[in-house]
Image (cartoon, grey):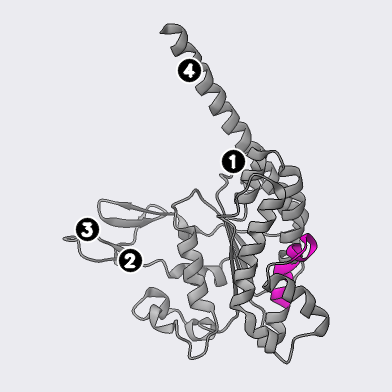
């Protein structure tokens, strides 16, 4: 029993060391991606929110006016819509939100989409009635005024590089389908049509996948006369899986090209918000 216990302890230590090493490698990878793409990022203070004893604190300061709901039913609503204002007034052109899963990253991106997205009849506007963001002086200037690209890579997991690209292609197909009206746009350029159709039909090559968001952002800018908001959720899930499955070198190259083509020197973008699940350690470029 002692021997088995000793072996289990050793295995547990090895597993912890492996995870620690994995985290460091992925942190370095994140730094490489951002350095290569030349992206300037910021992490807003809006997410540093905690709840203690039924009260909301932001940066350890009480903000109890943000909490509403029925204590009897045990439900609370936390109004985080001021995050929208901070993205515009305090954020960089590209904002990175690195948080573990279940921290509300996707919910925040959905909120941004519904606030900014331009739709017929501005159907999402009523969602923000009675919310804090309604008091913002620039509410009407930005609400419902921009095309939006929203892509999630959280389910892009596979055992091989090729199968991972298939899953990424499927997510892109969904987003291109959402913007299928561009096919009838008078601004559609003939030389872009083949690439658009390949992505729309889920038959894109690797090169077309890498340039997909850049292509879509340019077409949206041409059609609407204004650049889109680009929301990329869990960009690092394929990288994390690739590290475990042994093809992360190839995935790094793909993600570097994929991200740099849309986030580096791209004039066809209003703002970019990226979420990731990687913990940013003190060795990263975000320290200080």
Residue 215 belongs to magenta span:
yes
Q: Nearer the viewer, residue 215 or 58?
A: 215
Q: CA distance from mark 1 to mark 3?
A: 35 Å
Q: Residue furthest top?
A: 2
Q: Which residue is mark 4?
A: 8
Task: Mark yes or no: residue 204 visible.
Answer: yes
Q: Which is more N-terminal, label 3 or label 4?
A: 4
Q: Which residue is mark 1?
A: 281
> What is the quadrant of residue 244 in the picture?
top right
Q: Which is more N-terminal, label 4 or label 2?
A: 4
Closest to the camera, between mark 2 and mark 3, is 3
The prevailing secondary structure element of the residues shown in magenta is helix
Tell me if 81 is positioned left or right of 25 in this view: left
Q: CA distance from mark 2 to mark 1?
A: 31 Å
Q: CA distance from mark 2 to mark 4?
A: 47 Å
- Looking at the rendered structure, the secondary structure element under dot 2 is helix
Disc marking residue 66: 2
Q: Residue furthest right?
A: 191
Q: What is the span of residues highlighted in magenta in the rendered image?
A: 204-218
Q: Marks 3 and 1: in contact by CB < 8 Å? A: no
Disc marking residue 74: 3
């Amino acid at each position: 029993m002692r021997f088995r216990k000793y072996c289990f302890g050793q295995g547990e230590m090895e597993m912890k060391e492996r995870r620690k090493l994995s985290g460091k490698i992925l942190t370095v990878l994140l730094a490489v991606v951002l350095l290569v793409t030349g992206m300037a990022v910021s992490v807003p203070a809006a997410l540093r929110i905690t709840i203690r004893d039924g009260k909301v604190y932001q940066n350890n300061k009480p903000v109890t006016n943000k909490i509403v709901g029925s204590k009897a039913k045990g439900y609370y609503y936390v109004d985080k819509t001021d995050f929208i204002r901070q993205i515009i007034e305090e954020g960089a052109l590209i904002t990175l939100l690195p948080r573990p899963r279940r921290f509300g990253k996707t919910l925040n991106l959905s909120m941004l989409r519904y606030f900014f997205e331009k739709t017929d009849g501005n159907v999402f506007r009523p969602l923000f009635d009675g919310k804090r963001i309604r008091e913002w002086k620039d509410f009407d200037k930005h609400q419902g005024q921009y095309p939006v690209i929203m892509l999630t890579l959280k389910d892009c997991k596979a055992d091989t590089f090729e199968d991972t690209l298939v899953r990424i292609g499927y997510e892109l197909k969904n987003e291109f389908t959402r913007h299928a009206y561009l096919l009838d746009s008078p601004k559609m350029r003939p030389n872009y049509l083949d690439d658009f159709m390949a992505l729309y039909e889920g038959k894109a090559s690797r090169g077309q996948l890498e340039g997909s968001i850049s292509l879509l952002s340019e077409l949206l800018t041409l059609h609407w006369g204004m650049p889109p908001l680009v929301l990329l959720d869990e960009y690092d899930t394929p990288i994390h899986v690739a590290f475990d499955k042994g093809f992360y070198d190839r995935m790094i190259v793909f993600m570097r090209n994929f991200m740099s083509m849309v986030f580096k020197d791209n004039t066809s973008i209003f703002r970019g918000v990226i979420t990731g699940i990687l913990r940013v350690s003190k060795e990263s470029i975000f320290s200080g």
